Image (spheres, rainbow, N blue to C red):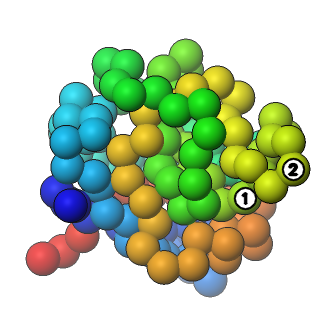
């Protein structure tokens, strides 16, 4: 069951932007979700690690149900560097088709729709996470 939705916008306002929404999972990582919602809007610069987009944030969240393997479209919070992660395929640590973060992440949500469109995103692009206008 989803608690809230967020909007993810990648690219600069003057250029072609990629925009998508994600649902946040109720009950799995309440501390992570609360910390992220409290920090919105969050702006960062995209880094890539295989088919993972990640960027550092000022969010501080507790370890909650950390996962060593994730699913396509999952949103993760990586504690070692307070990083927001979006997974859309195998990473550099994956074996075969599995999707493996560098180390365990709090999985707190999932992209709504096809997350593989993120394959077109390049390092250095601007990313903004914000609330969905209700």
Does label 2 or label 1 sit earlier along the sequence?
1
Horizontal arrangement in the rendering, residue 119 relative to residue 82 (left or right): right
Residue toward you, 120 or 90:
90
Q: Report x, y in % for residue 37.
A: 22, 45
Q: Quadrant of the C terminus?
A: bottom left
Residue 28, picture quadrant: top left
Q: Quadrant of the N terminus?
A: bottom left
Identified at 20% across, 49% down, the residue is: 26
Q: Nearer the viewer, mark 2 or mark 1?
A: 2
Please tell me whether mark 1 sits on a helix, a strand or a loop. Answer: loop
Residue 12 drawn above or below residue 94? below
Residue 53 drawn above or below residue 66? below
Instruction: Count neighbours of disc 2 (C-alpha within 10 A) and say few if under 14, some if 14 to 19, many if 20 or more.
Output: few
User: Which mark is drawn over residue 101?
Assistant: none
Identified at 72% across, 58% down, the residue is: 89
Residue toward you, 65 or 59:
65
Horizontal arrangement in the rendering, residue 87 relative to residue 27 (left or right): right
Q: From this viewpoint, is residue 17 visible? A: no
Q: Label 2 belongs to which residue?
A: 96
User: Which mark is drawn over residue 89?
Assistant: 1
Identified at 48% across, 41% down, the residue is: 76
């Amino acid at each position: 069951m989803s608690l809230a939705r967020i909007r993810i916008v990648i690219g600069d306002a003057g250029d072609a932007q990629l925009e998508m929404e994600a649902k946040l999972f109720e009950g799995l990582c309440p501390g992570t979700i609360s910390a992220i919602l409290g920090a919105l809007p969050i702006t960062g610069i995209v880094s890539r690690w295989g088919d993972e987009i990640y960027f550092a944030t000022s969010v501080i969240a507790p370890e909650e149900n950390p996962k060593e393997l994730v699913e396509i479209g999952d949103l993760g919070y990586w504690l070692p560097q307070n990083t927001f992660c979006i997974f859309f395929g195998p990473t550099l640590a994956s074996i075969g088709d599995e999707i493996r973060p560098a180390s365990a992440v709090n999985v707190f949500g999932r992209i709504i729709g096809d997350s593989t469109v993120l394959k077109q995103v390049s390092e250095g692009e601007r990313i903004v996470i914000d609330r969905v206008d209700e």
